[in-house]
Amino acid sequence: MGQVAAELRERVYRANQELAESGLVHGTFGNVSGIDREAGLFVIKPSGVSYAEQTPDHMVPISLETGEVVESRFRPSSDTPTHLELYRAFPCGGIVHTHSEAASAFAQARLPIRCMGTTHADHFRGDVPVTRPLTREEVEGEYERNTGLVIVECFRKGGISAEEVPAVLVAQHGPFTWGRDAFEAIEHARVLEYVARLETRVRLLAPDAPRPDAFLVDRHFLRKHGRGAYYGQR
Amino acid sequence: MGQVAAELRERVYRANQELAESGLVHGTFGNVSGIDREAGLFVIKPSGVSYAEQTPDHMVPISLETGEVVESRFRPSSDTPTHLELYRAFPCGGIVHTHSEAASAFAQARLPIRCMGTTHADHFRGDVPVTRPLTREEVEGEYERNTGLVIVECFRKGGISAEEVPAVLVAQHGPFTWGRDAFEAIEHARVLEYVARLETRVRLLAPDAPRPDAFLVDRHFLRKHGRGAYYGQR
Amino acid sequence: MGQVAAELRERVYRANQELAESGLVHGTFGNVSGIDREAGLFVIKPSGVSYAEQTPDHMVPISLETGEVVESRFRPSSDTPTHLELYRAFPCGGIVHTHSEAASAFAQARLPIRCMGTTHADHFRGDVPVTRPLTREEVEGEYERNTGLVIVECFRKGGISAEEVPAVLVAQHGPFTWGRDAFEAIEHARVLEYVARLETRVRLLAPDAPRPDAFLVDRHFLRKHGRGAYYGQR
Amino acid sequence: MGQVAAELRERVYRANQELAESGLVHGTFGNVSGIDREAGLFVIKPSGVSYAEQTPDHMVPISLETGEVVESRFRPSSDTPTHLELYRAFPCGGIVHTHSEAASAFAQARLPIRCMGTTHADHFRGDVPVTRPLTREEVEGEYERNTGLVIVECFRKGGISAEEVPAVLVAQHGPFTWGRDAFEAIEHARVLEYVARLETRVRLLAPDAPRPDAFLVDRHFLRKHGRGAYYGQR
């Protein structure tokens, strides 16, 4: 550990502060983590400590291999095993969990957030899926770990790329997003909430509105991602 | 009185200021109280004094036994008799009344706030009920006291635990919440408004969405409450 | 004029500044006026001057008898003739016009804001009515004056007391409110917007929800108004 | 170039800062441009540079004749070809593109924003139209330029005056507005979002509400525009 963990703790601390200021979380809810894959550990916020009280020292390193806390006297977020399973399955550098209002409502309504326009397509190449509910065994057993496994199952069974759709709704719970690092994961959480608000309005105003053509979705997604991207400065 | 009342007045004053900053109340509406059961009195905000003008001295002590004002030249909130009946019936340490928008709309619509997800289950173990309307006799008699009695009746007849569901909607009026002290009661008022917003969205997006399984609700409620709780630092 | 107008201008200036900070108006929209019935004049904001640029000197005195500007080089709000007719017909001391979102939507939807709960009844003893649309002759003639006359007709024909219901929605336009002075008129504009938000939610969540009993509405209205009022300090 | 471009860059820079503070854009989304028709060039914000990082020097001049960048090391907004086609077809001095929530939802729902009241009529003399979706050829070819051409087609085929209705919704994308200069275009973007919010409420509360009479719409539009205008100071 040492230097690597210190830098990562600092970054994850700043990301949690940014999340707190984003309006996407309430009280001690929500969490951000970031991973150093070379060092084999990720760092996550502590459980039940308000964002205002947190310092970099509160951030808890977790071993990617064992899932155990590494040299910290703090207990990690209760959602840590969910993050662990996502890091094991998805090639991402940071993960965010919020209870943001519009996205959580879709999770509670058990509806995907459909890709209905270019704001969505700029970030997510298709619908943001909602998982199946967990079974009694999954809930009463290793609940938080099983939450992660059910997310991974949702993407595998649905043939969805975690790189092209870096977000999911856990049924009756709320959203998780991820990205290349903790800050991009937060940006995806912000955009997810925004497109959930747009999609709410569309479902209420015109439930039968036609979807955008696939070539429009691809144009927007690929304008910002991959080899042909032409957005931004070079 | 003396020292006990002075400390409680200070705490209830701070709680009312926190409520004013919460966005849950408007003008002079809403009120917070806190109780000292050993001293046999609770303290509540004065009637019709704006939050900005209030000082600890404005907070009015009330005898739990007689319901009378104890050594104060201010008139207590007109809702004082409602608080009195709730303190007599429920084992709580603080009570809040607001007209917060989403929760009041459910009260006006005469609909409970159903437990549709984990954000709700983290705080309330089941639906937040709505009372029956008061009768003409109840309204034209001791109206505010009868409001308290109708809340208590709602929980007794419905077999609802006031500790597991520390919130209610008074029909055509608005929400009351309670907690271990005045600050937890405010936190419950915040969360109630939030889950009312979520539930509004669910009812509009997917009125027939299935409810979460009881084992999921219990898992979340018990993760934070009671002997098996494992949320937060120890 | 002189002293009377100077004091009234100062008060109406402050009221317009309060309106600007209320979030109920946009850009140069909206206006507040206040009257001195002994002096026979009311004062209103100028037309098309942003709230930030206004000074007390910009406020324009208007004769209640003639409707003419009294000693000012500024043009009064284009809605001045509406205010004039309301002052002539209703026993009020201040008038506010806004395009606040929820209330204006009811005006556009041609729906009254029904009295569905105690927050409404605390301020308005019954539904807030919506006028009939103006005829072609009324629109193409003295449009702003006719707007005032149609409001007065709405209350007279509907048997509504302007003191008990100090608010109206002009069809396809927006709300006007009034009160004992300009500041109470602003408070009524704030509450109107709030109950319009509540009523929007009720109509979407439970369009057939029963109305509150008349004895509940009366209890709340009379708790704050008239001889038997028992709200506030004495 | 030189002096002309420097002044225009400064103005367009300030307009982009105003847009950033308006709440109508998110992250690096959205853009404002302004034109100097005598100099034959317009200036637009750079691509993918956050509003906080921008300086006047980042603003990119574009030739109205060739559509090419004029003396700048920055890449212009990816939407530049859309602005170019609008400047060529419409007699305006500034253009704004946002993804503002309510207006974008109408674009995604493929619904026009109907003129349902006087707030709308004060700024837009009739419905704000929604374009047809672009074809595969249009999307896979010069996508941003074709977006501009489809907007122009929408107005030409619909017989709509770009001066009387300075706003459009691009299907499944979002709004563009324009005005006499960049600042009026922003004002139109603000009002468009506001009337989109009003219209959302009307569609949900009373989908069959009658439209205002044409003489009411004309009275309001002409009260502020054209020879007979009588709003504001002279």
Image: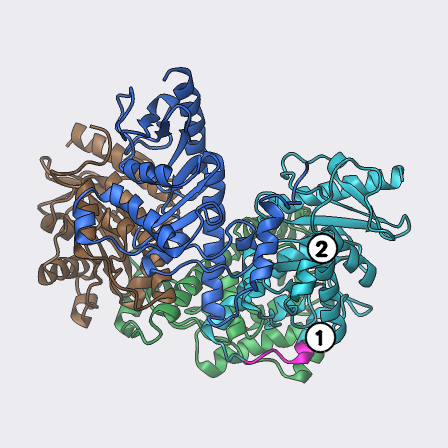
Chain colours: A cyan, B blue, C brown, D green
Give x and y (percent) for residue A4: 87, 41
Whether residue D227 is visible to the viewer of this picture, yes or no, is no
Q: Is residue A140 magenta?
A: no
Q: Chain of mark 2?
A: A
Query: Label 2, label 1: how many angstroms apart (C-alpha)?
Result: 21 Å
Mark sitting on residue A185: 2
Question: Number of callouts in the render?
Answer: 2
Residue type, numbered disc 2: Ala
Where residue A111 sits in the image (x, y, percent)? Answer: 57, 70
Q: Quadrant of residue A188?
A: bottom right
From the image, which quarter does the C terminus of chain B lie in?
A: top right
Q: Is residue B110 left or right of residue D18?
A: left
Q: Nearer the viewer, residue A86 or C149?
A: A86
Q: Quadrant of the N terminus of chain B?
A: top left
- B146 lies left or right of A99: left
Query: In the image, what residue occupies the spot 39% across and 63% down?
Result: D198
Pointer 1 residue: A218
What residue span does the magenta drawing correspond to? A210-216
